[in-house]
Amino acid sequence: MKGYWNITKSTIPVTLSVIFLFINNQENVFAAPPRPHLCRPEQRDALVKLKNELEVFISPFGYNCYVNGTILTPHPKTVSWEINNDCCTWEGITCNPESGEVIKLDLSCSYLRGQLHSNISLHSLTALDLSSNDFNGQIMSSLGNLSLLTSLDLSYNRFSGQIPSSIGNLSHLTSLDLSDNQLSGQLPSWIGNLSHLTQLDLSSNNFSGQIPSTIGKLSHPTFLVLSSNQFVGQIPSSFGNLNRLLSLVLDSNMLTGNFPIALLNMTMLSYISLHGSHFTGTLPPNVTSLSKLTFLDAAYNAFTGAIPSSLLTLPSLQFIRLQENQLNGTLDFGNMSLPSFLRELSLGNNNLIGPIPSSISKLTNLQYLDLSNLNTQGPVNFTAFSHLKSLYYLHLSNLNTTTTVDLNYIMSCFKSLYLLDLSGNHVSVTNKSSATYDLVMQPIQSLLLSGCGITEFPELLKTKQFLTDLDVSKNKLKGQVPGWLWTLPYLRHVDLSNNNLINFERSPRTGPSLMMAALLVSNNNFTGNIPSFICDLPSLRTLDLSNNNFDGVIPSCMANLRRTLTDLNLGQNRLHGGLPEYIFKYLRSFDVGHNQLTGKLPRALIHSTYLEVLNVGNNLINDTFPFWLSSLPNLKVLVLRSNLFHGPILLQAPFPKLQIIDVSHNHFNGALPSDYFREVECHVITLD
């Protein structure tokens, strides 16, 4: 009994403590008041006012938005904003957990539309993101009152006008993104006063004038994008002060001058794009000072002189794009003793001459190579390319070489090719069985063999099940288009024009790929009726059968294409009968000139509101002047010549965009309206 009491006595304090804690917790459960909302009422009211000012639109077609390198599906964030809920729990809202103030507002990708009128009176905001919506009008000057903002993103909207000067008051900004809008005017000089900016993106707007030199005052920028605007003049020399800059994107402007030497001071630069401007002069030989450079794009300019051999030996470089310039001299890859990490080398369409250096075989990491229009002035050793096992895209068109390219050999060298362009070279095709497993699985999608002198279809194409684009135009192909061509399931663009083909072999299937978007067979010797399989191509947008000997009528089944065709050319054949009465809803160009068509101009054309070019010349069409075509809002070219049109040229309203009209060699009579051609502002008028 004594032992029992000792044990019980020792447990009494513990037991009483547990009971006390239980009772105390129960009191807290039943007695504790509910936790108050964190969000401040005045800030909730400001957000509700903003919500009520905007329209939520849900596009029936949907769209994706691009945020921080990730593709997102938009959804209406403001739908979750219920007045009786804590606004700090609303989607897109971030609050300070202690003060309850809204510090971040993210309404990106929210299907929002309209103009911003009221002040966003959330003075504790540090980040505001309204990107990827449909806002329009001017940017609110009241944004300059959000003095604590460090990040402002209004990209991918339709804001217009100039940048309000009040934005210059946001002295704490580190990131400003106004890209992909409709902003205009000159870039204000105060942009250089935003001393904490690290990222500035003003691309894809309508800014004009010179780039202000004050940008060189920015002390911390790492990311500067001014591309796709209308900037003129030279890159300011003050840019040389931006020695922390990692990425400089100035492409697609109207900038001039030599390669900016100031850029060579930016020793941290890893990305430079000067693509598509009007730069001249030579590339600097001391480009090696940019030792961290991985990406250089100076394509589509007017640079001259030789390519510095030191450029190709920069160990960090992975992408070089210098195509479409006026560079000359010979190719020199310099000392290739170090391994090259180069993945893209684009030098096509310059004035380079001489042989392809054998040292190109050391660029074993190349995935994209463009040497188009290199004047090799002699034979080419194509075995040098056999070491480039990683190539996805190979452009070797118009090499001006005496060497015949063996298509089978080239294809067997590269197991991962997506595109091969040998146009303008002499190519041999060996139609022998060489369909190894690797070649069958080769993912090639585009094969361009225009003007290669080939006389028969390469049978190795039978195994290219991923082929989407085939260009064998301007060759010496004759006879039939093989039926097996149409068994390739993903064909989208086929160009057979300018050959000696006479008909289509019956396909083992019902017809070409259901994905076919363009079929070009002009300037051949096709005869007979227009083949009916064309009517079974539900995705066809461009059809060119011109300059052949097709006869018969335009098949009625082409009505199947009335919702897809945008360009239809049946000119220079022997077609007869009337023009189709069905409506080609999206047609932009319709050419049936130089046939034997009769009847009247179909009134259904009045519904082809996208039509820009209509040519019915040199037929037997018997009708009066089609004044009703003046209702077509985009018609620019109208050719009625050499038909049986008759009567007066009557017009109820001028053609709004007409530039060329030819009504010659018909039977029109009466007086020509005195002010008609002045109103339509035609560039070419033919009346004789």
Image (cartoon, rainbow, N blue to C red):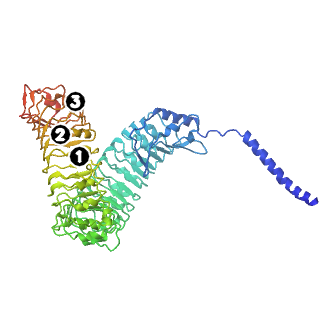
Question: Which residue position holds label 3?
Answer: 631
Q: Quadrant of residue 436?
A: bottom left
Q: Is residue 571 above or below residue 360?
A: above
Q: How many angstroms separate mark 1 from mark 3 (CA)?
A: 34 Å
* Residue 301 seen in the figure: no
Residue depicted at x 48% and y 32%: 52
Give the mark nearer the N terminus: 1 vs 2: 1
User: Amino acid under label 3?
Assistant: Ser
**Contact between labelled residues 2 and 3, with CB atoms less than 8 Å apart:** no
Q: Which residue is mark 2?
A: 554
Badge 2: residue crowd in 10 Å (few <14, some 14–19, many ≥20): some
Among all residues in the image, which is located at the extreme right? 1
Q: What is the C-alpha distance between the residues marked 1 and 2?
A: 13 Å
Q: Which mark is residue 533?
A: 1
* Mark 1 element type: helix
Q: Earlier in the sequence, mark 1 or mark 3?
A: 1
Name which residue type carries label 1. Phe
Q: Is residue 312 above or below residue 526?
A: below
